[in-house]
Amino acid sequence: MNERYDIAIIGSGPAGLSAALNAKIRKKKFVIFGNKELTQKLSKAHEINNYLGFYRKSGKEIQEEFNNHLKEMDINITEEKINNVYAMGDYFALMVNEKIYEATTVILATGVQYGKLFEGEERLLGKGVGYCATCDAPLYKGKVVTIIAYNKHEEAEANFIATIAAKVYYIPMYNEEVEVDSSIEIINDVPIEIIGEDKVRNLKLKNSKIDTDGIFILRDSISPGQLVPGLKIVKNHIEVDRLMKTNINGCFAAGDVVGKPYQYIKSAGEGNIAALSAVSYIDYISKK
């Protein structure tokens, strides 16, 4: 039986970290998923003057303060990528490759870093398009697989699926040197459209076209509507009320993912509200 957390927080920007701090203060059992490294958005901030108490601080300096706060509160970030979140009635199942986490509530604080969908991607999702190569690898034994990767660490997934599939194409969307198994064919071209009717047939690129049975798109994060089936999205943002509640019971959201303005102080405040709302929800259902 899986360990069940009170709160699972997805995202380690100001909203997610603020939610984690408040979950800790309220003595709830929680896990926060994200990246311990400085985000690109924060690292590029030369000077921030609209975050109360942090006048004329750089993004790097504010990140250091965040890290110091987490250390003092003994909060650790779990560096695993959540591929899907499913509402199971009285809890949520969070899928990480072959692993499953369980939580009574979920706080989505993923930001707006997910890329624009390829043409045909959403229509063919589950029909040859996926976001986790290791999860679905057994389905492609002896078949042709294409991996579109946005981060060098995804090379490990490509190497794994190469042990199962008959052929693997690898399309790197990053600038570092690619180091994958010699059996994998590296394609330095830009994906344009995923083609197929009832299932994936081809991938159209800017300068070429390849036949493939499956396509795995490995972005650093995926859109919230794909992450959590049934989540209400309005104008590319998660719809929430003033308590950061989504349309799914027990699911809350905060930060850039719920809309503008995209500011750190606004995100941190919403993370605080989301955590308090999650705590109230947990306390309420525990008394029923």
Image: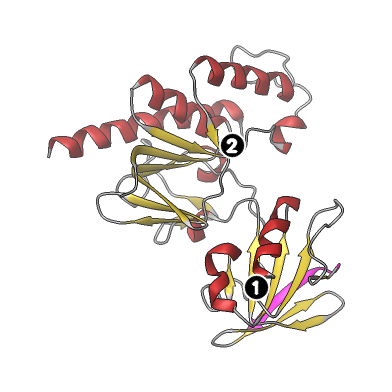
Q: Which one is in front, 81 or 105?
A: 81
82 to 29, vertically: above or below: below
Along the line of sight, the residue nearer the viewer: 275 or 199 = 199
Magenta residue span: 188-195
The percent position of residue 85, horizontal first and vertical second, equals 43, 54
Question: Residues under labels 1 and 2: Cα distance?
Answer: 34 Å
Kind of residue sitting beneath label 2: Pro
Residue, x 80% and y 82% (percent of image)?
A: 209
Q: Residue furthest front?
A: 163
Compared to residue 170, the image places residue 270 above or below, namely above
Residue 284 seen in this snapshot: yes
- Is residue 256 one of those drawn in magenta? no
Callout 1 secondary element: strand
- Residue that appears at 46% across and 29% down: 20
Rate crowding at label 1 as few (under 14), some (14 to 19) or many (20 or more) other CA atoms within 10 Å. many
- 193 falls in the magenta region: yes
Q: Nearer the viewer, residue 195 or 186?
A: 186
| Tally of numbered tags | 2
- Residue 7 falls in which quadrant of the image? top left
Residue linked to disc 2? 261
**Residue position marked by numbered label 1 in the rendering:** 215
What's the amino acid at mark 1? Ile
Q: Residue 18: x percent and y percent?
A: 49, 27
Residue at the (87%, 77%) spot, across then down: 207
Q: Quadrant of residue 8?
A: top left
> Which residue sits furthest left?
288
- N-terminal of the pair, mark 1 or mark 2, is 1
Q: Position of residue 52 (x, y in %)?
A: 59, 15
In the picture shown, does residue 120 fall above or below 76? below
The chief SS type of the magenta part is strand
